[in-house]
């Protein structure tokens, strides 16, 4: 077998590592990615905001946060419904923590300065699945707008 074929055969037999089972941390990351991608654009401002949120929430450095985001992007792509991701958070996170997660979604939505109906739709779905009220949503949005 020629060397080129041997090299290619090594790569063709490499199966990707299986994705981890989503937990509340990965579910939040996947939801952040989902809201960022919901308007069919995935802007650098949104990616940077996701990385900062993941780093702060999980005590990660920039490289670790980017790796976690990459995992979350893959999980989001395999896409269980939004409600399932939110349920992972609702089942394990107290009310105040769920408000923080909703605030994080608003931070990503507002990161690029463009607010699209698709993004608002994802946030509304998540808010309901998290068991949060419209008033909670308004408070989370206001907190995200403040910085």
Image: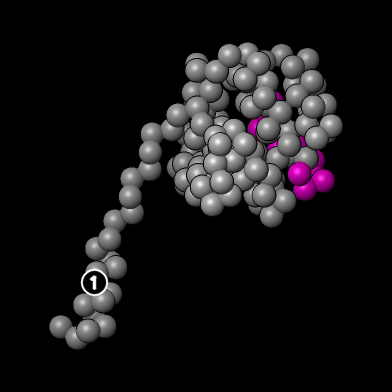
Which residue occupies 62% across, 36% down? 56
Q: What residue sits 58% from the left and 49% below the top?
A: 62
Q: Position of residue 66 (x, y in %)?
A: 55, 50
Residue 134: % across, % down: 75, 16
Q: In this orientation, does residue 32 appear? A: no
Q: Is residue 83 left or right of residue 105?
A: left
**Visual colour scheme:** one colour
Compared to residue 64, the image places residue 56 above or below, namely above
**Side (left or right) of 42 relative to 24:** right
Q: Position of residue 6 (x, y in %)?
A: 21, 77
Residue at point 45% right, 29% down? Answer: 23
Examine the residues drawn in magenta and state their main secondary structure.
Answer: helix
- The percent coordinates of residue 94 (x first, y second) are 58, 14
The total number of labels drawn is 1
Q: Which residues are magenta?
A: 111-124
| SS at mark 1 in the image | helix
Is 5 rendered above or below residue 115?
Answer: below
Quarter of the image where one finds residue 35:
top right
In the image, farthest residue toward the bottom? 2
Crowding near pointer 1: few (<14 within 10 Å), some, many (20+)?
A: few
Screen quadrant of the N terminus = bottom left
Above or below for 63 versus 107: below
The reply, left or right, for residue 111 in relation to residue 97 is: right
Pick the front one: 58 or 22: 58
Residue position marked by numbered label 1 in the rendering: 9
């Amino acid at each position: 077998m020629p060397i080129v074929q041997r090299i290619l055969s090594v790569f063709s037999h490499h199966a990707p590592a299986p994705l981890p089972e989503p937990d509340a941390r990965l579910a939040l990351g996947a939801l952040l990615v989902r809201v960022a991608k919901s308007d069919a654009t995935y802007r650098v401002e949104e990616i940077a905001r996701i990385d900062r949120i993941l780093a702060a929430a999980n005590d990660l450095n920039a490289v670790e946060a980017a790796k976690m985001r990459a995992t979350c992007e893959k999980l989001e792509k395999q896409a269980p419904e939004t409600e399932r991701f939110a349920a992972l958070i609702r089942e394990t996170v107290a009310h105040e923590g769920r408000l923080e997660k909703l605030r994080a979604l608003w931070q990503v939505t507002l990161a690029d300065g463009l607010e699209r109906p698709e993004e608002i739709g994802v946030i509304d779905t998540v808010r309901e699945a998290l068991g949060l009220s419209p008033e909670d949503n308004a408070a989370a949005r206001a907190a995200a707008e403040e910085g």
